[in-house]
Image: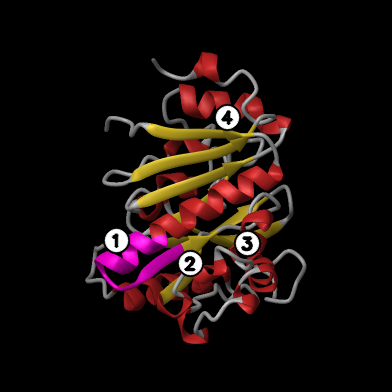
Amino acid sequence: MAPPVADVVVVSNAAALAEQAASRFVEAATKALADVGTFRVALSGGTTPQGLYARLAAEPFRSRVDWARIQVFWGDERCVPPDHPDSNYRLAHELLLSRVPVRPENVYRVRGEATDPDLTAAEYAGELQTAFGLKRGELPRFDLILLGMGADGHTASLFPHSPALREVTRLAVAVYVDAVKGYRITLTLPVLNSAAAILFLASGSNKAERLRAVLGGKPSHAAPASMVRPERGTLHWVVDRAAATGLADSLPR
């Protein structure tokens, strides 16, 4: 599969990153709502999207989105209760969802508090099938999936050399993360690569080396973010100057 041409925007700081990402979010929402009447988005966790969520909850972006027609999902979740400090749902709820008129029935959170991670992943896959009206074997096509990238090249909860990277049929799987001694639920690569648009956010000098490899190299299990290449969609990166150090010399020409 030929790699999509990544649209890479380099910004000066965290505030500019949040502003640019919010503009991309609103643009994707406006297009989807005009085309099909619903905007389906998968949110991410971590520190980088915090500024984006806060920006979307404030004017002028808040009024530019018809929140009642948005369906909200998550690209991954930690297996913790929804009020836990590590919960991706809690992050998005506190900074964004509690501050905009999104309908509760349109928020599809992962039940991270459940005791069986594999069952939780299967149930979330079932929710996706129902929400998207999928037939057996079909993949959901998100209008936008927000992703981050760790310094090790992981994205969502797809970590380097994880067996989850070889998954081709399931929509969501449970993964055990040695670094935190716990389970997470993640969407799989086939789901990510079926999206209409992927928006990666990356900040910090600790991401620079891996970012150069991801954008300038071939897909590799060593850097799962490099394997996110939407087959019929667009691929966007918004990164700060620290993360973009040395990036120009590594991009394909």
Residue, disc 4:
211
Which span of residues is magenta-colored? 29-41
The quadrant holding residue 150 is: top right
Looking at the image, residue 159 sits to the left or right of residue 94; the answer is left
Residue 139's tag is 1
Label 3–label 2 contact, CB within 8 A: no
Q: How is the image coloured?
A: secondary structure
The quadrant holding residue 144 is: bottom left
The amino acid beneath tag 2 is Arg
Is residue 249 positioned above or below 172 on the image? above
First reached walking from the N terminus: tag 2 or tag 4: 2
Q: Does the segment drawn in magenta span residue 122?
A: no
Front residue of this view, candidates 252 and 87? 252
Q: Secondary structure at mark 3?
A: helix
Residue, disc 3:
53
First reached walking from the N terminus: tag 1 or tag 2: 2
Q: CA distance from mark 4 to mark 3?
A: 23 Å
Q: Which residue corresponds to the image point at 46% horizontal and 59% vertical from the top-left?
A: 26
Q: Secondary structure at mark 1?
A: loop
User: Is residue 115 visible from the viewing direction of this image?
Assistant: no
Residue, disc 2:
64
